[in-house]
Image (spheres, helix red, strand yellow):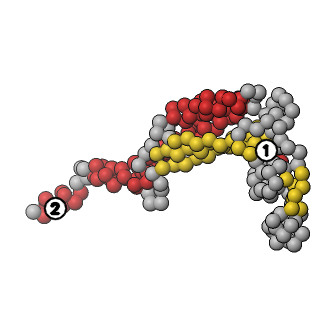
Amino acid sequence: MRRFLRQLATDCRGATIVEFAMVTPALLLILMGLFDMSHNMYTAQMLNGAIQQAARNSTIEGAGGREAALDAIVTRSVKAVSPNATVRFTRTAYRDFTSVGRPEDWSDVDNDGSCNNGEPFEDANGNGAWDRDPGSSGFGGARDAVLYTVTIDYPRLFPIARLIPGQSEQMQMQSSTVLRNQPFGLSEAPAPVTGNCT
């Protein structure tokens, strides 16, 4: 019996399968994480390329009537990589590049950081009210700067969310670009006027 126990203590047969069983879960988790990250990066590149092409096509004269066709090109590009993705589009037109994402200018007379108490402001979009974002929805007119944003939601390709706490089963990605419309006519944007904050 002692001889058998000594032989058993020095016997290494089968050790490899035990080591493999211990290492395999961690290896699979790392591989799935790498594949998931690669898929997300590839999806982002496809989205960026498609939105740049669609935005360039949006800046030419007559693009306003082709909104559905331009959006369909981006949707096809995204769905080629993530077939179950949902795609949302927004276009916001501004008078110029410096207005994108900035509130209308106002004089903060009382230094409270808010446009109120009759403080004067520049009404860039001509709607009679101070706006935190003076852009208008759509393609805009000639020479307008247009912010084109696409947001996609898609399920992860690999089940990372079940294996790593804090991960979501859905991914959300957003891409934006700003281009100026070609000068195919006179600008339709109203000339800025002044008003008073309420």
Residue 9 at x, y percent in the picture: 22, 60
| Mark 2 or mark 1, earlier in chain | 2
Position of 75 relative to 121 (above/below): above
Q: What secondary structure is found at the residue carrying circle 2?
A: helix
Residue 49 seen in render: no
Q: Which residue is mark 1?
A: 94
Position of 132 relative to 114 (above/below): above
Classed neighbour count for the residue bearing mark 2: other residues with Cα under 10 Å, few (<14), some (14–19), many (≥20): few
176 displayed left or right of 171: right
Res. 175 mark: none
Residue 195 at x, y percent in the picture: 87, 58
Q: What secondary structure is found at the residue carrying circle 1?
A: strand
132 displayed left or right of 44: right
Q: Which residue is mark 2?
A: 5
Q: CA distance from mark 2 to mark 1?
A: 84 Å
Classed neighbour count for the residue bearing mark 1: other residues with Cα under 10 Å, few (<14), some (14–19), many (≥20): many
The residue lying toward the viewer, choosing from 104 and 166, is 104
Q: Quadrant of the N terminus?
A: bottom left
Residue 69 at x, y percent in the picture: 61, 28
Residue drawn at the location 24% of the way across and 50% of the way down: 14
Residue drawn at the location 81% of the way across and 48% of the way down: 125
